[in-house]
Amino acid sequence: MALLVHNASRVVTPTGTAPARRNDLGELRILDGAVVRCEEGRIAFVGPPEEHDRLFPPPEERLDAGGGCVIPGFVDPHTHPVWAGSREDEFNRRLRGETYMDIARAGGGINSTVRATRGASFEELLEGTLARLDTFLLHGTTTLEAKSGYGLDLDTELRMLEVIAEAGRRHPLDLVPTCLAAHEVPPEHRDDPGAWVEELVRRIHPEIARRGLAEAVDVFCEEGVFDLEQTRHLLADAPLYGWRIHLHADELTPLGGAELAVELGALTADHLVHVTEEGIAALADSDTLAVLLPGTSFFLRSSYAPARRMVEAGCAVALATDFNPGSSPTESMPAILQLATLVMGLTVEEALTAATLNAAAAIGRAGELGTLEEGKRADLAVLREPTHHHLVYHYGVNPVRHVVKGGTVVVRDGTLDNLGARGRSGTSPA
Ligand code: NIG
Ligand code: FE
């Protein structure tokens, strides 16, 4: 089955299979009037329509881009999409002056979502997650990293990871699962956090690894949560399990999380609002990507990671939503690009690469995702307007008109379409 995306104003994409740094971050390939041919889920051709017609037979299906700009589907490399309950009460308290940490210490924050999630069934969690995935897709995201971490006990962490696996089978979006059982110290261990760390290391991580439910592991390395020593201990067995490492690093305080991520050979260090100059230098000199989450700064009304300095120092910068009920309840990568440019000072070109190619690298998928080049997966978004600048310029609205996932049109004219065998109501394929 071949699909031809035609009548685009242009196709705009980063290139290559390695994360872009420094000046390369803003280097996009812009092909005016190009068509994109998708075949067997992959990109078979990107270029002038006449050349396409010379080289290929007519496609079975055509998608009219309506003069819009075609970009790679967004990859969102840091999300917490499985939970029950809601936190808008805490949001209101923060608007009145309480801080995120005040609320967490008083039993709210992550632990309030943990209480609701422990009480929710597999079906309830799955239903909520699938509805959120629809919203991601409608905003142009075609692959996301998905963390557990609102269970904080073996049963609920397993349930969350099984929800992620089932949601990935049912929904067109691809989900890459990460074990974040080390997201917080649960209330029952408040008096003895050391025992919780041992429980994670000896029982919970090995069991999740044994069941093959995660590709990566993450720790909330933060003052009052897990310190550097505990984080090292929590991640020591990651190579044994074949897990890539992500780290919530230097989010609320400058603890040295970036340096630790580099020391451990982590794939990413995330947040980095309070990264030190040493941390920036360490990241720049390493293969660890810096995943920046400006939605969290916006929503917590805090300062922002020093994105420009990091790019100029040579860090491989990626962008993500941090989608979660407490500190960043948005599925919209376009909203993140708006903050990354208008507040953090990246150019639109840099932000687009950070949200596609570099974001793919941040989940270990840069070989197959993140650019519109022959051989990569046919995941793309068609914007309503003719240039990629409209992603940011026309802010506060959804700029995405159509979405193609694995060569299938899954959003048409802003509406979910053709979810096929993997659709929400469909059964999982064998
Ligand atoms: O990435 N920092 C820790 N975890 C999330 C917040 C989760 C929550 O508040 O529920 C974050 O910001
Ligand atoms: Fe997070």
Image (tube, rainbow, N blue to C red):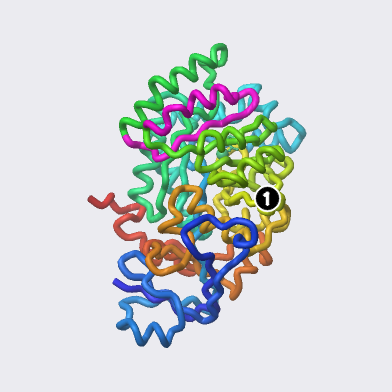
Amino acid residing under circle 1: Ala
Can residue 87 be seen at all in this image of the molecule? no
Mark 1 residue crowding within 10 angstroms, few (<14) / some (14–19) / many (20+): some
In percent of width and height, residue 365 lies at: 43, 52
In percent of width and height, residue 279 lies at: 66, 38
Q: Quadrant of ligand 1?
A: top right
Q: Tell me: residue 3, above or below residue 149.
A: below
- Give the residue number, with chain letter if any, for mark 1: 313
* Residue drawn at point x = 48 percent, y = 33 percent: 180
229 drawn magenta? yes
Q: Give the range drawn in magenta.
A: 212-240
* Residue drawn at point x = 68 percent, y = 43 percent: 297
In this view, the residue in front, 66 or 248, is 248
Q: Tell me: residue 68, above or below residue 368.
A: below
In this view, the residue in front, 205 or 309, is 309
Q: State which quadrant residue 326 falls in.
A: top right
Can residue 332 be seen at all in this image of the molecule? yes
Secondary structure beneath dot 1 equals helix
* Residue drawn at point x = 58 percent, y = 56 percent: 354
In percent of width and height, residue 283 lies at: 61, 43
* Residue drawn at point x = 48 percent, y = 59 percent: 370
285 drawn magenta? no
The residue positioned farthest toward the top in the image shown: 191
